[in-house]
Image (cartoon, rainbow, N blue to C red):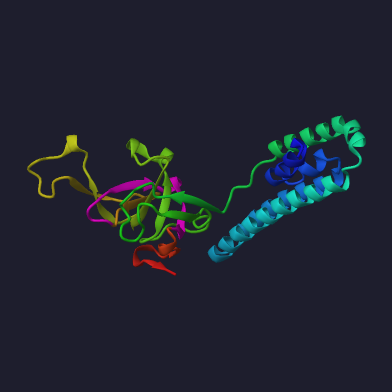
Amino acid sequence: MKFSAIFKPIASLVLPGSGQILSGFFTPGVIFFALWLASAHTLVALGSSLDADGRHAAYFAALACEVLLRLGSAIDAVFRQRSQAGSQRARQRSMVARGLAFTVLVLALMALPAPEPAIKAYSMNGTRTLLPLITPDSRLLVDKQAYHTAKPEKGDIIVISTRHIAEGKGGGPHIISRVAGLAGERVRVPVPAGQQNPGWEGQGYRECLVDEGNIYLASINPTSPTAFLAPLTSVVGRVAYVYWPLSRAGRVTGVSGISD
């Protein structure tokens, strides 16, 4: 089997329509590419105007469209190659034109802004702060549009970006934690080791007021206590679902648990 007979279907699987263009079928290739591009942008734009359940449905619909279009384009490329097996000489003459069209298609794809997904996957990365609600090996779907028109509520499990957090809070590029205090409430936060007063009752913590524009995050697991303040601007989204491990898959409803 020639390399091109394998390469072109694989190219269509990676970038719908590319295998057809490389085989000389410019119009079908552009149609596959346009359908793939339009479906992703349309479903993401539609999801931004829906409620949480609607956005989740749009996410899975976009995933299904992605798989079907890629597979359909690859299968179509296979059949089109077979139909033109006797016209090898004509394909060679149009190789330059097909290569140019393919290059233009890839450059157009690179120039288009990628749509911001309404739902994004995150993992706990071994973090034990949310046990027993969420296990350290869990993988999560996060609704990034949950707080576009609302603010986090107490009990929400959220993802925050560490790039926006002062004082170098650790945990990698993101932290997954529970909202335990809102603006206007008094909370207890850990005092850095160098600032602790050995004679002070309640050593290791200080009471403070959560300022407007901030939230207070605290762990659920008593054996792995963490607590800190974070700005609302650091909030990425609300954890909506656990999809791995399968034994704990379901919707995250905050500190009350996970409902199947």
Residue 222 in the image, given as x and y percentages of width and height: 23, 56
Q: Nearer the viewer, residue 3 or 252?
A: 3
Location of the C terminus (image quadrant): bottom left
Q: Nearer the viewer, residue 24 or 111?
A: 24
Q: Residue at x 70, y 40 (%)?
A: 112
Q: Quadrant of residue 5?
A: top right
* In magenta stretch: residue 139: no
- Residue pushed farthest left? 199
Count the marks: how many? 0
156 relative to 159, above or below: below
The rendered magenta stretch, by its main secondary structure, is classed as strand
* In magenta stretch: residue 229: yes
Q: Residue at x 81, y 45 (%)?
A: 29
The answer to whether residue 182 is visible is no
69 relative to 191, above or below: below
Give the side of residue 171 with respect to residue 64, left or right.
left
Location of the N terminus (image quadrant): top right
Span highlighted in magenta in the image: 221-244
Residue 73 in the image, given as x and y percentages of width and height: 75, 50
- Residue pushed farthest front? 1
Q: Nearer the viewer, residue 216 or 63?
A: 63
Give the side of residue 208 with respect to residue 183, left or right.
left
Residue 128 in the image, given as x and y percentages of width and height: 31, 51
Give the side of residue 144 with respect to residue 154, left or right.
right
